[in-house]
Image (spheres, rainbow, N blue to C red):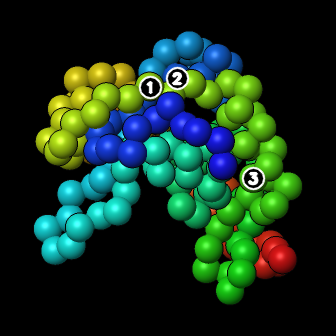
Amino acid sequence: MRPSPVPAAAGVYGWHFEKAPCPDLDAGRLLYVGIAPRYMANRTSTQNLRKRVRYHYRGNAAGSTLRLTLGCLLGIELRRVGSGKRMTFGKAGEATLSQWMAENARVCWIEHDEPWTMESELISQLDLPLNLDQNRHNLFHGRLTEVRSQARQRARELAVSA
């Protein structure tokens, strides 16, 4: 595995895109923030900035709300996979999304020992159209919720993908 500039530390990360994932969003500006690890009262998370950012870049839509959002906005077909409970863009779709992200996504981060203390404030004070959680006030929230809902509904109508 190649060395990563992203630290294996707790913190907040933000995503910008050279080309916006849909025409209604501006390119080159912060569209999404996430944290690693999440606050968990009953156990310790093993997540950190490096693991989380890497998963967003190379994982799948079932484990990354950012990938799910981007793929749906880009019109990549969501499919039920495995037992039929998980939804991803399938092998080809996830590869297409990973390539789009490699070409267009830019991530920045700041280390912070308790990133969950910053998340609500960032979402309430910044215009982050790709964040859904705690972000109903955003003008893009309804549209994004609908796009994702329609993609899930279509996936439920299709056969389970290998």
The residue identified by callout 1 is: 108
Left or right of 58, for residue 56: left
Q: Nearer the viewer, mark 2 or mark 1?
A: 1
Q: CA distance from mark 2 to mark 1?
A: 8 Å
Left or right of 100, for residue 41: left
The count of marks equals: 3
Q: Secondary structure at mark 2?
A: strand
Expressed as whole percent of the image width and height from the top left, the position of residue 44 reads 23, 67
Q: Which mark is residue 49?
A: none
Expressed as whole percent of the image width and height from the top left, the position of residue 134 reads 27, 44
Q: Callout 1, which amino acid? A: Cys
Q: Which mark is residue 94?
A: 3
In the rendered structure, are the residues bearing label 2 and label 1 in contact, judged by CB atoms less than 8 Å apart?
yes
Q: Residue at x 16, y 74 (%)?
A: 42
Q: Secondary structure at mark 3?
A: helix
The one of 154 and 22 positioned closer to us in this rendering: 22
In the rendered structure, are the residues bearing label 1 and label 3 in contact, judged by CB atoms less than 8 Å apart?
no
